[in-house]
Image: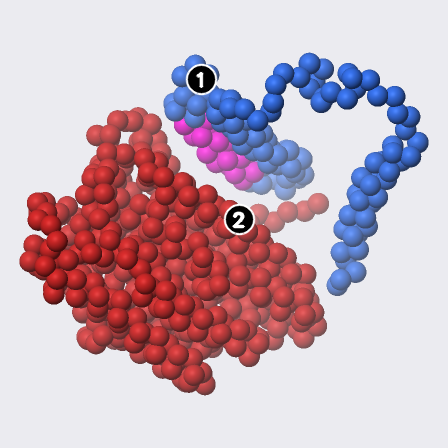
Chain colours: A blue, B red
Amino acid sequence: MAFDFVPILIQALVAIIIAVGVIVIAHLIGSRNPTPAKLAPYECGMSPVGQAWRRFPIKFFLTAMLFVLFDIEVIFFVPWAAVLRHLRAGGSEYVLFALGEMAVFVGFLALGYVYILKKRALEWEA
Amino acid sequence: MTFALPALDWWAIAPMLVLVLTGCATLVAELVRGDDAGRAPLAWLTVAGASVSGGIALGQWDDPARLAFSDMVSSDRFTLFFTVLFLVVTCVTVLFAFEQLRREDFHPGEFYPLLAFSTIGMVLMAAAADLVITFIGVELLSICLYILVGFSRRRREPEESAIKYLLLGSFASAFLLYGIALVYGSTGTTSLACVGRALGAPGGLVGACEGAVATGSVATGMLLAGIGLLVVGLGFKAALVPFHSWAPDVYEGAPTAITAFMSVGVKAAAFAALLRVFLVAFPTLAPDWSVLLAVVATVTMVTGNTVALFQRNIKRMLGYSSIAHAGYLLVAIVAASHAGAASLLFYAVGYAAMNLGAFAIVVVLGRAGEERVAISDYAGLSQRQPLLAALMATFMFALAGVPPTVGFVGKFYVFSAAVDAGYVWLALAGLASSVASAYYYLRVVYQMYMVDPKEVVASHSPHRWVSLVATVAGFAVIALGVFPGGIIGVATASTSFVR
């Protein structure tokens, strides 16, 4: 029974080894040639402006949160689409079942989308 | 790859489906009419949906008990009993909220869908035939509650209680999930009945149990650790000591309607889940966990009743009192018997009547801008509002467990189940602490009847629906205390799966 979980243990070990290993190797064999530009915080290529600890509009959070929500929903589409092909072998009732399930899911998703639209959560100037 | 179409027993979850539609309908209705005048339809829509759902649940009473949706939910009398109880609590909460939010002039329509969705979570917790469904129920309930707790954004304390509840609640969810993982790791299944069978429990409604380990070959150490974590996770929702520290702050900061909802509905849901999990999955391990739960119950009763003695705020006092009552309810699970399970269901109904009644009075006496929740605000209430004072006194006597109220009968059933199971010391501890509790309940009565009002307050006409709730609850408290037979019969029939 406990043996079944050994692959998970191995995966965890590999993850730790890679994470720690990359840092250690970079530390050991990397050459150091610091310049002021290299020491500056990485800001996607822009020159950094001011502190990160300042107030900025909460709309960023709202938009980011809604994006994550709808992005996560897509995770359900992929396995559904992967399985749908196999369901065709079972006959039309299987496909209809799968389509019905997805219709319900998309229905709820659409309701949520209409909700945030009507609540004007996506309007930046509102 | 082959598939079998899952059998879709929609009728088995019809009460929940109606609630889903109700929640979505209120959400859409709120969009269509976003102004404050559109709130009354939302409240009535929620009550109507809950009534239809409850009607369906009552209509299913004579249906055969069965597992539905690949053995995920059980449709039996236990589920139906708690469904009806939760729906009553939800309807009462709507009435409270409608009165209170209108008074506060802050009435977002999101309140009603959130309430409907959290009710589905509670029903799922009672209906769960699988630990995963228990977890989904807990999360559905909790996520809605995190928002509802911080609902009065005009004041400062709600923010504190909401963030406190969110942080501690997430911790508790993690414990619950870890407990489920350990139970799965040791038994190879998350289905409650299959875990029970792997541990050698006698029959009942058991599903397919694919992957479950054979009876008797369970890794006991891992399983006991899992059970311990399940107690932490569910005990948090039920506000058992030592997982109670959030409760008084949250109860104080939340709108009174939500405080009532949490102290009655959420607590009952947590106990429904505890009862399902422990008496379906782990009945054969009762000697191991009942001692642990007995200690937790004792500490809970003593702590709740002791700290309540020092409270000056009636919502905090009722908060600690509800912790003590969680201890009484846990005594019923410790008994691990059919009589104990039935007494838990009876006590849950009685406690709902007493506590909702008491909160109805708190709502009625509150006014715009100030909730008037200091116990000294109740001074001389008998002179100003004799009917309300009499009702409040009834609820206080009932909570203290004075005959002929339901509080007495409920405690009697719970403690006699514990004595039958050999826990005489637990029953004695419960009785002793409930005698001590009379002090703080009766202090409210003393304030209402013996102390002159400190200020002349213009009496206002209380909201008729909340007053109606208080009156009905008052009758129920007495009627169930004098004629407990009907409900105890129903409760016994609802717990027939406990052996």
Magenta span contains residue A106: yes
- Looking at the rendering, the stretch of residues picked out in magenta corresponds to A96-115
Numbered circle sitting on residue A123: 1
Residue B233, relative to residue A11: is it above or below? below
**B295 or A97: which is nearer to us?**
B295
Residue at horizontal 26 percent and vertical 27 percent from the top:
B35
Instruction: Read off the residue under disc 2.
Output: B170
**Residue B411, x across and y down, in percent:** 32, 75
Give the structural element (helix, strand or loop) at label 1. Answer: loop
- Secondary structure mostly seen in magenta is helix
Residue at horizontal 84 percent and vertical 44 percent from the top:
A17
Task: Report the label total.
Answer: 2
**Residue A105, x across and y down, in percent:** 50, 35
**Residue B115, x across and y down, in percent:** 35, 44
Left or right relative to B457: residue B223: right
Q: Mark 2 lies on which chain?
A: B
User: Residue B304, can we see it?
Assistant: yes
> What amino acid type is highlighted by mark number 2?
Ser
Q: Mark 1 lies on which chain?
A: A
- Dot 2, crowdedness within 10 Å: few (<14), some or many (≥20)? some
> What amino acid type is highlighted by mark number 1?
Glu
Quadrant location of the N terminus of chain A in the rendered image? bottom right
**Quarter of the image holding residue B356?**
bottom left
**B287 or B105: which is nearer to us?**
B105
Mark 2–mark 1 Cα distance, whole angstroms, equals: 31 Å
Numbered circle sitting on residue B337: none
Magenta span contains residue B466: no
**Are discs 2 and 1 located on one and the same chain?**
no
**Quarter of the image holding residue B341?**
bottom left
Residue at horizontal 51 percent and vertical 47 percent from the top:
B167
Q: Which of marks 2 and 1 is in front?
A: 2
